[in-house]
Image: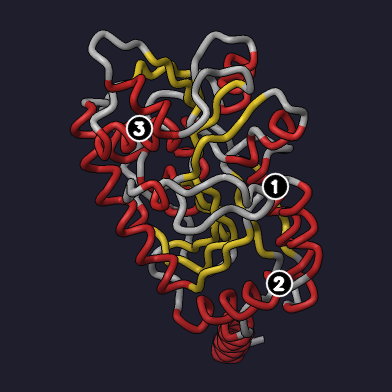
Amino acid sequence: MNFLTHTRRLAAALLLSTGLCAIATAQPYPNKPIEVMVAFQPGGGTDSLARAYAEAAKKYTTQPLVVYNKAGASGAIGLADVANAKPDGYKIAMLFVEVTILPHLGITKITQDDFIPIARLNADPAAITVRADSPYNTIEDFLAAAKKPGSDVKVGNAGNGSIWHLAAASLEEKTGARFSHIPFQGAGPAVLALLGGHVDAVGVSPAEVAVHVAAGKLKILGVMADQRVKGFENVPTLKERKIDLSIGTWRGLGVAKGTPPEVVEYIRTMTKKAAEEPIMREVMDKLNLGYAYADGPAFKAQMVRDNDTFKQLVTKLNLKN
């Protein structure tokens, strides 16, 4: 083979290779499995919701959705994993309300602006819950006690800077009450401390006290929501009591900033259909999670509002590390 022939063949091979790569690159999204990141250990509410979503969505995509867990730093490690990934739609983050809190605490530089919101799936308000034998029978009783000079009303939360800590702090700001905030390693331990009489109240979601309320051991005095909560219809909202406060947790989906618009639209369409699947409602009902679907723009608006609110609160409470 002469040099010229060899060169021509090599050039042809390179052109063929380049053409094949171009064809592969041009394949429509998705052409490989999609990963769904959960920033916490397996088994919790966020993890269960992600796995229900992956199961529900498989009817509406040509590729499987694979849930993976990347826990640590109050969720900051998992958030960074998706925010810093290639923005191609093959990593979807299960977002949670602390994405609007953690950066203000100095835990991470990742903010909600690093994500394009897909949809919110769930929302649960904060609630003030006390023991069934507590002398406080209404939210007014509870707040009146916390306003007395020298009072020491202890309110348990899921850790300094957690959504439940900030919810109770917001209630202080709105009403002039003063609490002793007692942090625990999660909402579960805080509820156990309430059952044991070590704190006077907790500010966690109704879902996290539902079993004990049903057993007659705890009672909810009020929920920080716009409307009464399904399953707790006898519990008034704070707004009904003339306290303009609506705050709580939420979970949703987002992809890295810079993801192509057509990919974002594909995931949004898939997610909207998946959210209507029975398995989603079944899992949420089983976990007492509030179904609260909101599309991308509405979800984004909420994240912006929450970010502004929590930035002010964290600064006021001097919680930044």
Q: Is residue 214 left or right of residue 119?
A: right
Q: CA distance from mark 3 to mark 1?
A: 29 Å
- Amino acid type shown at disc 2: Ala
Q: Is residue 80 visible?
A: no
Quickly name the residue at label 1.
Answer: 288
Disc marking residue 107: 3
Across and down, in percent, residue 203 comes to: 48, 31
Q: Is residue 27 visible?
A: yes
Residue located 25% across and 35% down the image: 173
Disc marking residue 274: 2
- Relative height, residue 103 to residue 53 (above, below): above
Q: Is residue 169 left or right of residue 194?
A: left
Across and down, in percent, residue 307 comes to: 30, 51
**Mark nearer the N terminus (3 vs 1):** 3
Residue located 63% across and 23% down the image: 132
Q: CA distance from mark 3 to mark 2?
A: 33 Å
Across and down, in percent, residue 227 comes to: 50, 58
Helix, strand or loop under label 1: loop
- Amino acid type shown at disc 1: Asn
Residue located 23% across and 27% down the image: 317
Mark 3 crowdedness (10 Å alpha carbons): few <14, some 14-19, many ≥20: some
Quarter of the image that includes the N terminus: bottom right
**Mark nearer the N terminus (3 vs 2):** 3
**Mark nearer the N terminus (1 vs 2):** 2
- Amino acid type shown at disc 3: Ile
Q: Nearer the viewer, residue 113 or 240?
A: 240
Q: Is residue 201 left or right of residue 178?
A: right
Count the labels in the image: 3
